[in-house]
Every structure is written in C-alpha cells, then in structure tokens.
Amino acid sequence: MLGKIPVEALRGVNLKVDAGDFISILGPSGSGKSTMLNLIGALDKPTSGTLLIDGVDVSKLVDNQLSELRLKIGFVFQFFNLIPRLTAKANVELAMSIANVSRAERSKRAVELLETVGLKDRVNHKPAELSGGQQQRVAIARALVNNPKFLLLDEPTGNVDSKTAKEVLTLIHNLNRENGVSVIMVTHDQKLSCEAKRTVQMFDGEIQSDMVN
C-alpha cells in the first residue's frame, strides 16, 4: 500500500525453479526483483496467488513454520550483513544457533565451510580486517551452514572489484554443479545474468521473458 492506494509490485508472475537450477532475475531498479526475492525466500507472503516452496504453500504457514522453512534457504545479501564485532567463524556459527546445532558441531562446520570458500587463514578475522570479496565469501559460507536446498543472491558482485567478482562467481558455479544447490541470483547487470543457466527478465512487476542462456 502507498497510503490508501494499493501498489502491485508483481503482477501475473508464473515461475518454476527446478532442483539444481541456476536462474538470474534481471531487471532495472523498481522492476520487482527484490519483491520476487523476498517472496521466494519466505520473507514476505503473497497477497494473492499461490507460492509453493519445496511443495509447501507459504501463504498457509504461521511464523514458526516460516522460520523452519527458511532453514532450507540460504541468503547472500549485497552488503554482506556481517556482524562487525564477530569473527568470520562466529558470524558463520551464528546462523546455526537457531537450528539447535550443538556448540562443538557449529564450530566444526563453520571452519569447514570457511575452508570451502577459501578462507582457511581468515577464520578469526573480523569483517573490518577482510576485503570486500572475503566478506562476501563469509556471507556465502554463512548461507550454506544449514545445508539449504537453494541459495538466494542479491547483487552478489555489486560491492567487489572485477577480479573478486570472477572468484565469487566461480564459487557459486561450483556450489551449483558439485553440491547441487539451486541458485537464484538477482541482478541488474546483463553480463552477470549470462552466468546463469536461465535468465528471467523483469520489468514493471512482470516477467517479460524466461530464456535459457
């Protein structure tokens, strides 16, 4: 709602994401990309229509059920959203605390994931001691801690240099191919969207095209 005027952020959207897929959602600012990502991530509920995540109708879930569903989803935000006073390891561990994982297992898995994303020697560094690319890798490790079925990325290379962007994309490709993680990436960058298997073009809240790259 904008005052008393209803605003349709998305209209007539019909999208299916298969297991192991890698999709980019491409469009300019205001096209509905972020709304789409929030819905797919069960952060928002649709006001009409049906949204199924892993066969579950999101609109029928209550808060605690939504929290459980979100454990199947890994989020990677453009601005990393790391807690400044915590080390890389502690930032990754924190995402497991809501999943009732033991302290010993949290510590072990956090280190393993940081090694997986190439940060074996940065485990005990705080965000201010890491480059933008390293912070993004921590964010990816954090997103993977609960073995999500799919990974949501919001402009994953928007705050890193071109060399680091290539490294981040290589990591994402490896997670998709080798770990079978489904990837949904939001971007306004045409070149970046071509890295995905499919590109969904959005404009004014509608899907304009859905093409295989």
Image (spheres, rainbow, N blue to C red):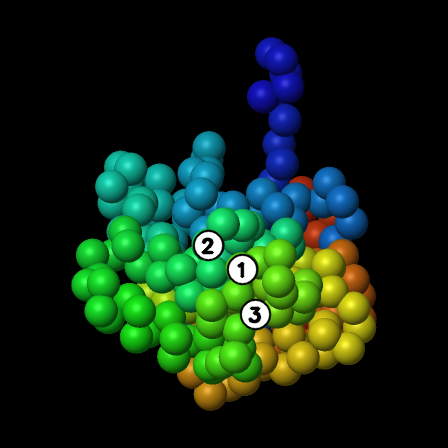
Per the rendering, the mark at residue 50 is none
Instruction: Name the residue: 25% across, 45% down.
Output: 65
Q: Earlier in the sequence, mark 2 or mark 1?
A: 2
Of mark 3 and mark 1, the one earlier in the sequence is: 1
* Picture mark count: 3
Residue at label 1?
126
Residue underneath mark 3:
137
* C-alpha separation, residue under disc 2 versus residue under disc 1: 6 Å
110 displayed left or right of 76: left
Residue 81 in picture, x, y percent from top left: 55, 50
Q: Secondary structure at mark 3?
A: helix
Relative to 120, does residue 188 appear above or below in the rendering? above
Q: Amino acid at mark 1?
A: Lys
Q: Are marks 2 and 1 in contact (CB under 8 Å)?
A: yes
Residue 14 seen in render: no
Q: Which residue is mark 2?
A: 86
Instruction: Determine which quarter of the picture holds residue 210.
Output: bottom right
Q: Earlier in the sequence, mark 3 or mark 2?
A: 2
What distance separates the C-alpha of mark 3 from that of mark 2? Answer: 15 Å
